Image: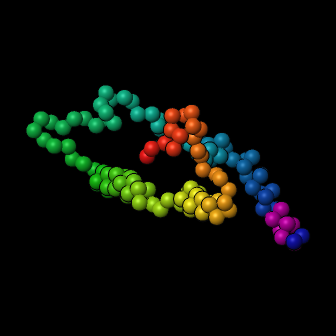
């Protein structure tokens, strides 16, 4: 452990010295090559409309993008439509009703005789 740290010490010192002695132009690492701002052309996405009587030529990436984007969205909708319902109400409610019925306790709602539906609400 100590041998490795001491062997790396001169290397780091050399890096610091070389960074201090280097000119400012050599230190810049993230500089670009010219302006990154595109002047507005007045056209949507910078594309000029095609000449009358000609069709727009689509780029090679457009059809795969459309298929992937809209096909993926359609597959997601179908998968969500047919996914199994695993909510608590689906599996726990029938079991709870069965257990309450077996216990003999009165647990279902019964409307009062003055509610207008003394025999229960018609279905």
Q: Is residue 63 visible?
A: yes
13 left or right of 24 in image: right
Residue 16 lies, with reference to residue 7, above or below; the image says above
Which residue appears at 55% of the width and 34% of the height? Answer: 115
Magenta run includes residue 77: no
Number of numbered discs visible in the structure rendering: 0
Main SS category, magenta section = helix
Q: How far from the left and from the top, in percent, is residue 49?
A: 22, 35
Is 112 rendered above or below residue 27?
above
Residue 23: name its quadrant.
Answer: top right
Q: Residue sitting at 33 percent across and 36 percent down? A: 45
- Between 50 and 29, the one nearer to me in the picture: 50
Q: Quadrant of residue 55?
A: top left
Magenta segment, which residues?
Answer: 3-9
Q: Is residue 72 left or right of residue 20?
A: left
Q: If the image is split into quadrants, where does the N terminus sit?
A: bottom right
- Residue shown at the point (59%, 38%) measured from the top left: 112
Q: Position of residue 71 (x, y in %)?
A: 34, 56
Q: Is residue 107 left or right of residue 61?
A: right
């Amino acid at each position: 452990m100590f041998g490795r740290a001491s062997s790396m010490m001169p290397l780091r010192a050399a890096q610091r010295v070389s960074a201090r002695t280097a000119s400012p132009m050599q230190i810049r690492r993230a500089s670009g090559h010219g302006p990154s701002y595109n002047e507005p052309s007045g056209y949507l996405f910078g594309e000029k409309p095609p000449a009358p009587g000609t069709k727009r030529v689509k780029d090679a990436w457009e059809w795969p993008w459309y298929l992937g984007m809209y096909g993926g969205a359609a597959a997601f909708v179908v998968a969500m439509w047919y996914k199994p319902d695993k909510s608590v109400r689906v599996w726990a409610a029938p079991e709870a009703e069965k257990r309450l019925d077996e216990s003999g306790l009165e647990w279902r709602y019964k409307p009062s005789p003055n509610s207008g539906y003394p025999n229960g609400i018609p279905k």
